[in-house]
Structure formats: C-alpha cells, structure tokens
C-alpha cells in the first residue's frame, strides 16, 4: 500500500499556491491508498483560511484523506472552526494496516500534548490489531530533531509517556509534522518520520517544499522524501547526509 503525507500547508500569508498546484498533480498521479494531512493546514486558524484549505484539499483525488489539526489551526478559536470543515475520525483500517491519529494541538498553545487518557485510548485501540502494521500520526514532533532550536518547549510535553505507549503497542511507524524539517529516527523496530513543509515559505534546514511517500509491503515500511517538482529519494538520505560541522550540510543531499 502507498500513503502520502503532506504537512504544514500554512494556507494564509505564507502559502505557496504554485507549490500546492504541483503537489495536486504529483500526488493525484500516484493514486495513493491514503493521503495524510498532518496539521497546520492554516496559518492563523481563521475562517477564510479554513474555507480555502477545505477547497484546496478537495482537489486531491483520493477516497481516504486523513486530516488532523496543528497548533496554527487552533489559534484564534480555530479549535472551534476545525471540526466544522474536517472529520474528527481517528482510526482508519486498511487490508493489513491500521492507522490511528493522535490529537496534540491545544487552543492557542504552540507546544503539543497527548494526555494520559488519549495515551490509554491509543494502547487499548491498538491492542485489537495484533496482526496488522500499526501507524500512528500526529502533528507535533515526538522526538526532537537536530538544528530545530527551542524543541523541548514546542514539542509534545508528555513525549516520554507517548513514546512509551507507542513502544508498548508495537507501533511500526509514527508520522509527525510541525518543525518543517524532514528527518527519520529508527528506534529498533519503530520508525519516526517527520515531514517538511509542503507548500509554505517557512523552511527550516531544507529550503525546498517536500512531502513524504510511504510504501508498505509484507510488513516492510519504506519512507521516501519527495521534493515538490523535483526528485524522490529515501528519507534516510537526509540523515546519512548530515554533517554537524557544516551549516550547509543538506545542500549536497538535495542538489
């Protein structure tokens, strides 16, 4: 099966319409089984931005478009508006995969939080799917990413509890957005994949718009990064190309 993860659209003043137009063409040509829009659809959580986001996302031709909010969507009472435009469904079942979304956004807060009850719910829900590949998707980053600054404050406050719940539930893949920095952590059998910004000017580290393509087969998971209008490569290349002594360490990976 194939999943596409696009994240951090920031529809508003920082939105790049030409980049999103290219995404629509590229993703529709892939015909993925599901498209995951992992938060920050809007820049300010304003109603006209939600209206535009709803209109733009409708252009994606897929029967399974999975959408959940980010911290920018919950600004300015956006937490009241989001559910008027997008579904609140959290569990998605496919042939050999279960995908569960976890809400981390809180009203008018940049940092994320999962909470004890939601962690319990996640563990209880995933315990019913012992023979399936398990994917959990959330907006905020679960583990800090290199060169992303004030990570501990604007990440998930109870990240340790959430990571433990994922490991206890034998989750195979966690998908995150938020920091606009593509990255991949491997913790034993658990992969944690981060998406860059799909179509905004808010770059961090990699100065290209990107999204992730996830392919699964026979329990194996491969995550690729796709530059909008450019090439596709394994997301692990970003990690392999990292050289901490050079501020331009990603140039050779992207070029």
Image: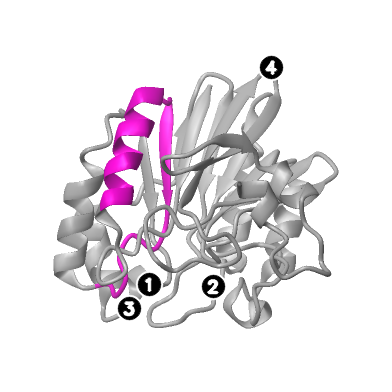
Q: Is residue 232 magenta?
A: no
Question: Mark 3: few, some, or many residues within 10 Å (few <14, many ≥20)?
Answer: many
Q: Where is residue 167 in the image (x, y as percent from the top left)?
A: 77, 49
Q: Is mark 1 on a helix, strand or loop?
A: helix
Residue of label 4: 218
- Residue 75's disc is 3
Distance from the alpha carbon under mark 4 to that under mark 3: 41 Å
Instruction: Give left or right: position of 158 versus 93.
Output: right
- Which residue was labeled with disc 1? 72
Question: Helix, strand, or loop for circle 3?
Answer: loop
- Residue 179: quarter of image: bottom right
Q: In this view, does 229 lie above or below 138?
A: above
Which region shows up in magenta?
18-45
44 is higher (above) or lower (below) than 232: below
Mark on residue 112?
2
Contact (CB < 8 A) between labels 4 and 3?
no
């Amino acid at each position: 099966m194939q999943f596409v993860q696009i994240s951090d659209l920031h529809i508003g003043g920082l939105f790049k319409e030409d980049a999103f137009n290219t995404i629509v063409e590229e993703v529709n040509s892939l015909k993925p089984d599901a498209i995951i829009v992992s938060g920050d659809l809007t820049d300010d959580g304003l109603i006209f931005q939600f209206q535009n986001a709803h209109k733009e996302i409708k252009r994606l031709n897929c029967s399974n478009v999975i959408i959940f909010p980010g911290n920018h969507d919950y600004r300015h009472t956006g937490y009241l508006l989001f559910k008027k435009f997008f579904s609140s469904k959290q569990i998605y079942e496919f042939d050999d995969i279960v995908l569960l979304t976890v809400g981390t956004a809180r009203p008018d807060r940049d940092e994320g939080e999962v909470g004890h009850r939601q962690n319990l719910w996640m563990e209880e829900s995933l315990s019913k799917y012992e023979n399936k590949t398990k994917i959990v998707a959330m907006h905020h980053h679960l583990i800090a990413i290199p060169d992303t600054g004030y990570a501990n404050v604007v990440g998930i406050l109870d990240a340790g509890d959430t990571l433990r719940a994922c490991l206890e539930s034998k989750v195979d893949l966690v998908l995150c957005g938020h920091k606009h920095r593509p990255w991949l952590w491997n913790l034993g059998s658990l992969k944690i994949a981060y998406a860059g910004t799909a179509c905004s000017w808010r770059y961090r580290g990699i100065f290209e718009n990107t999204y992730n393509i996830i392919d699964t087969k026979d329990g194996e998971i491969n995550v690729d990064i796709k530059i909008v209008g450019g090439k596709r490569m394994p997301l692990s290349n970003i990690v392999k190309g990292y050289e901490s002594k050079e501020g331009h360490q990603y140039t050779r990976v992207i070029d």
